[in-house]
């Protein structure tokens, strides 16, 4: 504080007057506000929003009667799940202070929530609108799934039940299919980037014909990694078709909208990838039956044409015998060729079935091997080190099963 004595003041006159500089006054006001006013929640509407290269949010928070300048520094704003917008009604938590350089009263915001709807829901809708406008959800870019892929990629957690359900379905339907699993985090910090990296790695490997990306059920927060822009753009950039299999049937994520196909559950995704072998054999039998009926109809049609021509012949005796003989020859030859082709098809089917049977676990059992399942979790035992004395096992043989208990291990 500065004391100034007037030059024309009398020697024994009035006392010296005290003065504050503007900076001193602003600092006093700032200190008073910060010491007397606790942090508060303030409800209002965002206007005049500015985001400079620094990443700080500068805006005005207002209601129908008043307004106050507000700032949310980048280190606070980086954790927001949604993007603030002009006209958005929000709840802001922070402290009131004075910006001494200009003497402006402003609210220093530490956290922000959208009013009337959750931050995650708002972030979901904002990203969905943005990506839809860019064409990431367009139906005309979605690709069909391969009929019977030789290799299937799965991007998911290696610790969840979803992976084992998918492997079980694929193994039951076509055990000779190759499955490439890329384990990733599916929730929590950094999960979205891991999922995106897994999708990119499987694409770069060139080792898969189709890809399943997903996880089991959970809350909106648990599934949030599949609502991140990282994952959406990785799916969009995938060179192979992608099936999104996140949560349960009622759960929808951004990944579902971008993917080529959405499966209601991870198990359903595995069922989409490989058909049932029995269904294929039934389809082949129906084709065989339809082909046989077509040949029979063709023969009958040709006989009708022959009868029609016969009626129009003036002296049909000689021509009749020739055409009849020729028709018989053609009929016999056609039936013989068809039967040969049918036998070839059946032989090919038997050979294919034999190859499939050779790959079946049942064929391995026929050679004297057995499969041990640890009870009660039904887990296949591959290493004796995972067993303890007293554990119960169910042993599957080529004919029958037996339940036993571990007495010793080597």
Image: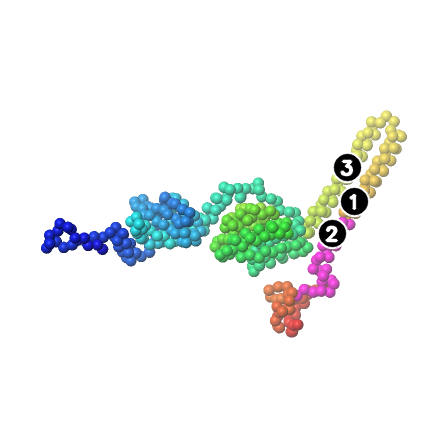
- Residue 46 x, y percent position in the rendering: 37, 46
Which of marks 1 and 3 precedes in the sequence? 3
- Residue 275 is left or right of residue 355, and the answer is left
Instruction: Find the magenta span and give its range.
Output: 347-373
Q: Are marks 1 and 2 in contact (CB under 8 Å)?
A: no
What colour scheme governs how the chains and residues are painted in the rendered image of this protein?
rainbow
Q: Secondary structure at mark 2?
A: helix
Spatial separation of the CA atoms under disc 3 and disc 2: 30 Å
Depth-wise, is mark 3 or mark 1 nearer the camera? Answer: 1
| Residue at the spot of label 2 | 352
**Label at residue 2:** none
Q: Secondary structure at mark 1?
A: helix
- Residue 36 x, y percent position in the rendering: 28, 57
Depth-wise, is mark 1 or mark 2 nearer the camera? Answer: 2
Q: Which of 271 and 75 lies nearest the eye of the viewer?
A: 75
Specify the quadrant that holds the C terminus: bottom right
- Residue 9 is left or right of residue 317, and the answer is left
Residue 125 to residue 166: above or below: above
């Amino acid at each position: 504080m500065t004391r100034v004595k007037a030059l024309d003041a009398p020697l024994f006159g009035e006392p010296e007057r005290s003065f504050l500089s503007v900076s001193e006054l602003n600092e006093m006001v700032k200190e008073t506000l910060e010491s007397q006013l606790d942090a508060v929640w303030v409800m209002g509407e965002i206007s005049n929003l500015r985001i400079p290269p620094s990443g700080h949010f500068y805006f005005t928070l207002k209601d129908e009667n008043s307004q106050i300048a507000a700032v949310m520094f980048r280190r606070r704003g980086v954790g927001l799940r949604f993007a603030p917008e002009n006209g958005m009604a929000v709840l802001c938590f922070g402290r009131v202070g004075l910006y001494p350089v200009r003497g402006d009263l402003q609210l220093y915001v530490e956290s922000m929530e959208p009013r009337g709807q959750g931050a995650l829901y708002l972030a979901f809708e904002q990203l969905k609108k943005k990506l839809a406008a860019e064409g990431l959800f367009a139906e005309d870019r979605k690709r069909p799934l391969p009929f019977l892929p030789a290799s299937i990629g799965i991007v998911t957690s290696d610790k969840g039940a979803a992976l084992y359900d998918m492997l079980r379905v694929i193994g039951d339907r076509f055990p000779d299919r190759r499955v490439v699993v890329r384990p990733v985090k599916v929730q929590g910090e950094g999960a979205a980037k891991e999922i995106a990296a897994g999708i990119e790695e499987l694409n770069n490997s060139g080792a898969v014909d189709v890809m399943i990306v997903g996880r089991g059920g959970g809350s909106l927060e648990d599934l949030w990694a599949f609502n991140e822009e990282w994952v959406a753009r990785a799916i969009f950039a995938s060179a192979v078709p992608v099936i999104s299999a996140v949560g349960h049937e009622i759960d929808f994520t951004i990944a579902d909208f971008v993917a080529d196909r959405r499966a209601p559950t991870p198990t359903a995704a595995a069922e989409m990838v490989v058909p049932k072998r029995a269904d294929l054999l039934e389809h082949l039998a129906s084709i065989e039956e339809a082909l046989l009926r077509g040949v029979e109809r063709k023969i009958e049609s040709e006989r009708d044409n022959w009868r029609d021509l016969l009626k129009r012949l003036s002296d049909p005796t000689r021509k009749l015998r020739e055409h009849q003989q020729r028709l018989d020859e053609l009929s016999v030859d056609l039936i013989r060729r068809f039967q040969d082709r049918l036998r070839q098809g059946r032989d090919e089917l038997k050979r294919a079935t034999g190859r499939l049977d050779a790959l079946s676990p049942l064929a391995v059992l026929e050679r004297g091997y057995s499969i041990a399942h640890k009870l009660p979790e039904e887990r296949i035992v591959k290493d004796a080190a995972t067993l303890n004395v007293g554990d119960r096992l169910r042993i599957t043989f080529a004919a029958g099963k037996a339940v036993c208990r571990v007495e010793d291990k080597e």
